[in-house]
Image: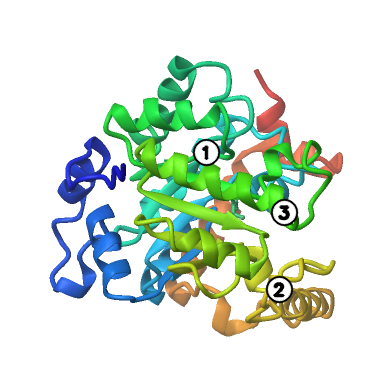
Amino acid sequence: MSTTPTTSSTAGAARSAQSQDTTTVDRLPVSIPSLAERKRRGEPLVMVTCYDFPSARIVEEAGVDLVLVGDTAAMTVLGYDSTVPVTVDELLVLVKAVRRGMKRPLLVGDLPFGSYEVSNEQAIATAQRFVKEGGCDAIKLEGGGVMIERARSIAATGIPVVGHVGLTPQTATALGGFKAQARTAERAQQVIADAVALQEAGCCLLVFEAIPAPVAEVAMARLQIPVIGIGAGASTDGQVLVWHDLLGLYEWGSPRFVKRYAELRPQILRALDSYAADVRARRFPSAEYTYSIDPAELAELNALLAEADGQSGPAEASAADGQSPAAGAAGSP
Ligand code: KIV
């Protein structure tokens, strides 16, 4: 049985209230039903990860359809070795910044490792934080098996759920590391079964990560909900890439499935080198980057200071001791 979600959701309702200043049909917020409609029409869906306010402004302007505040933030933004250590509180800071930066794309928040596996109650409580505090339209969780029940229980409360199968980085160790999945018939069958079960549990969307293109194609034939791929070939309804991979912000290489659309790291380095050179050579700030003051005001300031200095013996004394009056004031009780 397919349980493609209907239009109403608590998150969606909160969101349309936030987005009343959108003026054209094209700028209307992306909704779950509109994604299903786009799938029906065969229109590819564009998703990126995003972790901060200025990037969210750019994503909105670029007309991206879906934004994931992924737990990849653990590695891309927070510098952890894997996605495992990141906490709900850490991710929520990023989710809120992204929410403040954009209105139109559908905002998906990733439930971090340890925040939903223990029980349906734990999963619902965490999902509600992402919607209520973070302003997410949907949440994403990783894996099949018992996670199907977690997905079902969250979806039953009206929160749209995105499932994630194939390479699931939170449990990469159990999968043998960060490598392509579903490369044997048996493993592929399991991944497809999980995908179908997540759909039946009420997921509104799926992510396929790092599985062979032909396996994704077989799975697609069994799914009615939109599927976003990352390293899953071209048959999925859309694609997602991680911000730092897409823009070339790392000094190290990317996985096979990443296409880099820019090399921003060398550009940022060049900009910082120029800035540092200008500061060291006293070329920056030049006159165009400084504030002016009316010469008459400046003359008056000098006169006022001279008068005050003439009256204040202690300030003169401390200046004579090599101590600035300001330092003296800060040190006084
Ligand atoms: O956390 C993340 O960024 C993800 C994407 C790789 C899909 O799950």
Residue 181, numbered circle: 3
Circle nearer the N terminus (2, 1): 1
* Residue on which the image places disc 2: 248
Whether residue 54 is visible, yes or no, is: no
Q: Secondary structure at mark 1?
A: loop
* Amino acid of disc 2: Gly
Calculate the distance from the C-alpha at mark 2 to the C-alpha at mark 1.
26 Å
Measured as percent of width and height from the top left, residue 102 is found at: 35, 59
Calculate the distance from the C-alpha at mark 1 to the C-alpha at mark 3.
17 Å
Camera-side residue: 317 or 277? 277
For the C terminus, which image quadrant?
top right
* Amino acid of disc 1: Leu
* Amino acid of disc 3: Gln
Measured as percent of width and height from the top left, residue 283 is found at: 74, 83
Front of the two marks 2 and 1? 1
Q: Mark 2 touching mark 1, by CB under 8 A? A: no
Whether residue 331 is visible, yes or no, is: yes
